[in-house]
Amino acid sequence: MTEKLYEQDPALFCFTARVLSCQKTEKGFETVLDRTAFFPEGGGQAADHGTLADAAVTDVQLCGDTVVHLLDRAVPCGEIEGRLDVPRRLRHMQNHTGEHIVSGLIHRHFGYQNVGFHLGQDVTADFDGRLTKDDLLRIERLANEEVCRNRPVTAWFPSPDELAGLSYRSKDGIEGAVRLVRIGDCDLCACCAPHVKTTGEIGMIKIVDFQKNKGGTRVFLKCGFDALADYNEKQDNIQQIANLFAVKQNETALAADRQARQIAELKYEISLLKKRLITEKILHDIPAGAVTAVFEPGLDGKELQLFSDGLYRQNGGIRGVFSGQDGDFHFAICGEEQALAPFFAHLKAACTVSGGCRNGIRQGTVTATENEIVNAFHTYAPPGAE
């Protein structure tokens, strides 16, 4: 059994212990100490990292009552010094304590339970009820008020009698002694992880996103230095956008909306010009032969269909229109279905073709060069032709 120092003092970042065993495995060196301040992965929170002497601690897992440290190299049995990766531990404590506050407030005001929590690169909390943007803005405000009040955060193992008289949040299936974490009068929750000592140590709590999840709501949040880093990243992005539009930061949304409308208008004008161009080509560029391929850059699926169908209606035969570049063409081919079906089978045999069909038209993509496509058209002989 390992003495769990992280349960006693979450701010203990450097400690001494005795190495009881160190065994080489496929993943590294599994090492057991008589006591440790390294928190093992559990309760949705990733493990602490750091060092034992000159060995890096890359993972920590709880096996029964024993904490197993995974090292990148062997260490000798005997006394050793352990040092935690302090920024990583602080990040975990800030985010986990912030999540407790948010979950406690959601439970108090909406009656929803936290049914899933993950603290990795992202921090998410899942609730068994639907929350709106306005609901979460309210919760975010209340959570930051709890931070400003600098509430005490305490953790302890209550006796069975004491536990029976307490109302606390908990996941189902907890075995053994229950460790409770109290945050002022905001939240009381069963939790095995280390937390900050006062809510003021969390810093800002920011709900950055939310989405529907299995009939409930998944909330994405960032706390403390994570929230600061997120703010700085978004501010840098907004400033770059502002510079591109030559506006102030708080005017970027209006500038983007204005440009989106201008782009939509330009796309509409270009579409009209393309249709005029296609009409002119259909009327005046009459292709020679009954089976022809036309190549025109910059056309989308509807425009390809319009061009191909127009050529067919004007000239009959089988009319294919292609747009793209060697190795990646989109196409539309129109013709009388009875004649088009065998031709398309010929094209598929000659080139790598994918796409759909309906009566009188084939559309899709072809992986071939322009010369290969033209050759496939020129070498086609209709069934029964001599």
Image (cartoon, helix red, strand yellow):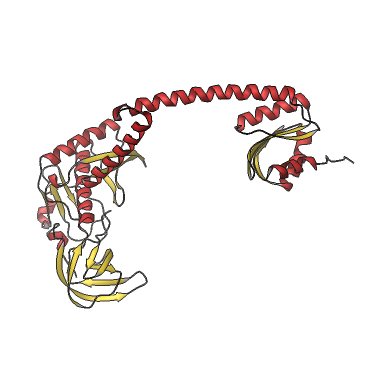
Q: Is residue 200 left or right of residue 24?
A: left
Which corner quadrant of the image does residue 243 belong to? top left
In the rendered image, residue 165, in percent from the top left (x then y), is placed at: 11, 49
Count of number-bearing discs: 0
In the rendered image, residue 317, in percent from the top left (x then y), is placed at: 79, 31
Q: Is residue 152 above or below residue 33?
A: above
Residue drawn at (73%, 27%), measured in percent from left and top? 311
Q: Is residue 186 above or below residue 18?
A: above
Q: Is residue 121 left or right of residue 354?
A: left
Q: Locate the C terminus by quadrant.
A: top right
Query: As rendered, which of 204 and 146 lies closer to the eye?
Result: 204
Query: As rendered, which of 194 and 113 lies closer to the eye?
Result: 194
Residue drawn at (33%, 40%), measured in percent from left and top? 216
In the rendered image, residue 44, in percent from the top left (x then y), is placed at: 28, 53
In the rendered image, residue 367, in percent from the top left (x then y), is placed at: 65, 46
Which corner quadrant of the image does residue 382 belong to? top right
Query: As rendered, which of 371 and 333 lies closer to the eye?
Result: 371
Residue drawn at (19%, 64%), measured in percent from left and top? 83
Q: Locate the N terminus by quadrant.
A: bottom left
